[in-house]
Structures are given as C-alpha cells and as structure tokens.
Amino acid sequence: MNNRFHKIQGPFILLLIVVLTQACMRFRLDAPASVPTPRNIEPTAIETRVESISTVPAVPTETPLVVTQDSGPTATELPGVTIQVVKGNIFIRRGPGLAYNPIGVLYKNTETKVIARDVLNRWVQVVIPNSDMTGWVSIQTEYSKLNGELDSLPDIIQTEWPIPAYLRNCTHHDMYIMPGEITLPSLLMYPDNEVWLNPGSYTVQDLLVPGKPEVLDFEIREGMKIDINNDGAGEHRKC
C-alpha cells in the first residue's frame, strides 16, 4: 500500500510542479509593461517641446521707414540773408561773372534779398528790387556787404556760359583801353590785335600820338564785336 502511494505521489508532484511553472511563466509574459518613471519621461518631453517650437515660423519685425522730402527753398523758407550796397552802385548780371550782361543795378545804400550762391565763384543770386526777376552780384567787391550766413544758402552751378564779346584794332597804332588798362597792339601784330572784353562801357586812346587822344568811346555786350578803325592822327583803316 505504501509503495503504491509513493509510486502515485511521485508523478503527481512532478505534474503539479510543471503546471505551476507554466502558470508563472504565463503570468510574466502577460504582465503589462512597467510604468515609466519621471526620469524616463523627461528627455522625450523636452525633445518633443523643442521640435514643436522650431516648426513655428519666425515673424519678422519691421522698423517704420520715415521719408523726408527736401523741396528746396520757397518764398516762406528762404534764409534770412541780404546784401547791402555800401560805397557805390554795382551791377546785377544775368550770370555769376563779369562776362555776363548787366541786367540791373543795385544803388548805394540799398539792400535786397539773397536766395542762392554760386559754388564756383563768390557770387550770389539776388532778387532785383521792384521786380520778380533775379540776377547775380559779386560779394568780392568792397561795394557790397553781406548780412547773414552764406553757408545757409542753397548752391547753384551755372550751366549757361557767357557769350564772348571782342574788340579788334584795325589801325597801325597801339591802343589803350580803359577801364582795364589794356594795351591793344596794332593790326600789324595779328592775331594779338583782338581782345575779349566783359560787357560794359569803354574808352580807347591812341598810344602813338602825343597826348593820347581818345579815338573811340563805346559800350559792348555779350556776342558783340567792335572794330577800332581810326587812329589819333585821323587815319582810317579796315581789318
């Protein structure tokens, strides 16, 4: 009896061990994955957050553009600069130089407004008194006095050149031209017997006749050509 019990008990115990072992293995295989700890979650969360930020396009910021317009001097914006005639009358010319025709006069003790300056010469553009015209006056002469800041005036570059005016000596005598104190050789010294004169009034004297008699009194303007045909001895010649 005991031997039969022991024979049956041995296989039964072995079978029970096998069943229990398989049950444990199934329990481990079917068990859910372990819950991640906060330390395991942190790297994934940071990486996901950075990636989402990098996909958002940056919105550029713009600085407002301020545009200013320089309309130049106007009748109400002109600098307060004037020119005054202090010792005598001076010509107002059509351009910034003595080679331009006079178009007006500034009389002694008068004053007018200055509206611009020439960048190459010391001439200023002025308003001709009692008119709506403008002209040019030299500020190099002792007859003019500038009141105000010259640098505050707008610059002008003259693009129209003066038209030359010439005086030609057709006689055989050397001549003397005033003002200017110019000695003009005779026709025998061609081409030196011709000189370019600035517009204005002149007097011609004969240098070879005693007393230097006056042989010509004339006014010349741009583009003109005037000949001296008579000398101080009364001889007449043509060029």
Image (cartoon, grey):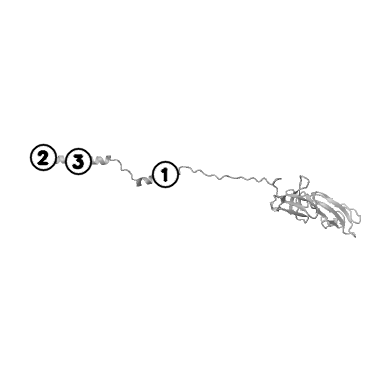
Residue that badge 1 annotates: 49
**Disc 2, SS:** helix
Residue 239 visible in the shown view: no
Residue extending furthest right? 234
Seen in the picture, residue 6 relative to 167 is either above or below; the reply is: above
Residue that badge 2 annotates: 5
Seen in the picture, residue 4 relative to 226 is either above or below; the reply is: above
Residue that badge 3 annotates: 18
Seen in the picture, residue 1 relative to 115 is either above or below; the reply is: above
Give the residue type at disc 3: Val
Task: Give x and y (percent) for residue 205.
Answer: 87, 56
Give the residue type at disc 2: Phe
Give the residue type at disc 1: Arg
Task: Give x and y (percent) for residue 13.
Answer: 16, 41
Task: Give x and y (percent) for residue 232.
Answer: 90, 56
**Disc 1, SS:** helix
Cα distance between the residues tagged 1 and 3: 51 Å
Residue under the point 20% across and 40% down = 20
